Amino acid sequence: MEEQNTTSTSDILNQSRDVLYGEQNKTVSLENLYQLMLDMNNRLTSIEKGMKQVNQINRTLTNLVSELHEVKSTVSKIDKDVKSLNNRCDKQETEISKVTTDNFNLNKDITQLNKTNAETDRNLQGISDFMDDFKEKHEQNAKDVKHVKTTVTQVKNDLNDQAIELRHEIKSTLSGIREENEDLKETVLDLKCRSMKNNLVFTGLHEIQEEDTEDVIRKFLLNELRITHRVELGNVHRFGHGAMPGRRGRPRPIVARFIFYKDLARVLSNTYRLKGKPYGVNQQFPDVIEQARKSLYPIMKQKRAEGCHVRLVRDILYVDGQMYTPPSAEDSHAVPAPNSPNNFATPEQRQTSKRRRTSSTPKGY
């Protein structure tokens, strides 16, 4: 049809050219022109119909292009889905492989578990046999323990009886040891007092460098106590703490041992000459006795001020011939009268509470 339309159009164009630009000697008639116009009208009508078909074809092509785009999108989506499906398939294959491996390992574990179960059954049977044997031994041990408990109870009772006897014996022995210890202390103290019986302590005598201590004592006896005859002395030396030679302070005391006790007694009888002077002469006693004497000095002065006859022998104070006994802690709240008989006891009365020391000092001093 297109070929016919093309030929017709060509013929019409040739015809119109002939009509318009024909030969000069050829006459152009209205009929020819009219026929040309009719042909052109028919051709234009045919072309118009063809244009409608072309427009329809264009619309069809446009629809086809749109559908092709949709198909392309669908194909792309399908391609993505296929790739995702492939990935999922790969994962499924991996998981299937893992499940297969796990299943294989599980089969191995089940096999091992069956072996272990069989071994456990054998062990349980052994344990059952052991428990039966243990039960028999336990019953026998229970009987033995019961017998041992009975024996232990008897031994415990015997030990308790022996412990009570031993405790009484130990208490008795300790009491005897304490008494012996007290006796030894008293004996040692008495021996110390006896060893110091002929010793006098001189205080307040000035100390010089490289002095002759015995010569210092002899000059003191002559100048201060007016003792002119020669006194026989044993060991004479300074002791304790005090100012060093050439320095200010209280000088160290001197202890002198008298060979004859009568010389010591004469020195003590002349100590009244030292009243008001910075010198002192005292008998030497152990520290225990000396501390006891210091606690009795205030009482001794008080009783002497009251007009009582007072005599201090070692650590025992005699007031008017009776031994003075300090008040106990229970009587500390009640203040007794100065001459209350509760503060005094005769040596015979004190003998019951404490063994009386044997004095090594004559009664006159």
Image: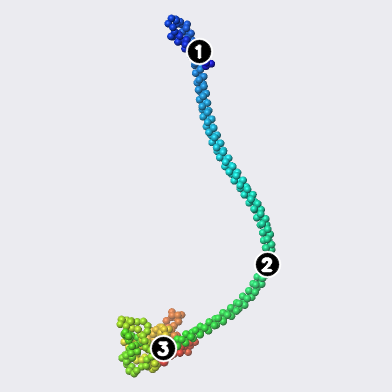
Q: Residue 55 in the image: state x and y as whole percent.
A: 50, 21
Q: Is residue 340 visible?
A: no
**Could you classify mark 1 by the number of other residues whose Cα lies within 10 Å: few (under 14), some (14-19), or many (20 or more)?**
some
Cα gap from disc 2 to disc 1, whole angstroms:
134 Å
The residue shown at (63%, 51%) is 109
The answer to the question of whether label 3 and label 2 lie on touching residues, with beta carbons closer than 8 A, is: no
Q: Closer to the camera, 204 or 237?
A: 237
The residue shown at (45%, 10%) is 17
3 vs 2, front mark? 2
Taking 142 as reference, is 177 left or right?
left
For badge 3, the amino acid type reads: Met
Taking 98 as reference, is 358 left or right?
left
Cα gap from disc 3 to disc 2, whole angstroms:
80 Å
2 vs 1, front mark? 1
The residue to which callout 1 is attached is 8
The residue shown at (51%, 85%) is 180
Q: Which mark is residue 196?
A: 3
For badge 1, the amino acid type reads: Ser
Rendered image quadrant of residue 228: bottom left
Vertical order, 147 against 318 (above or below)? above
1 vs 3, front mark? 1
The residue to which callout 2 is attached is 137
Vertical order, 43 against 288 (above or below)? above
Which of pointers 3 and 2 lies earlier in the amino acid sequence?
2
For badge 2, the amino acid type reads: Lys
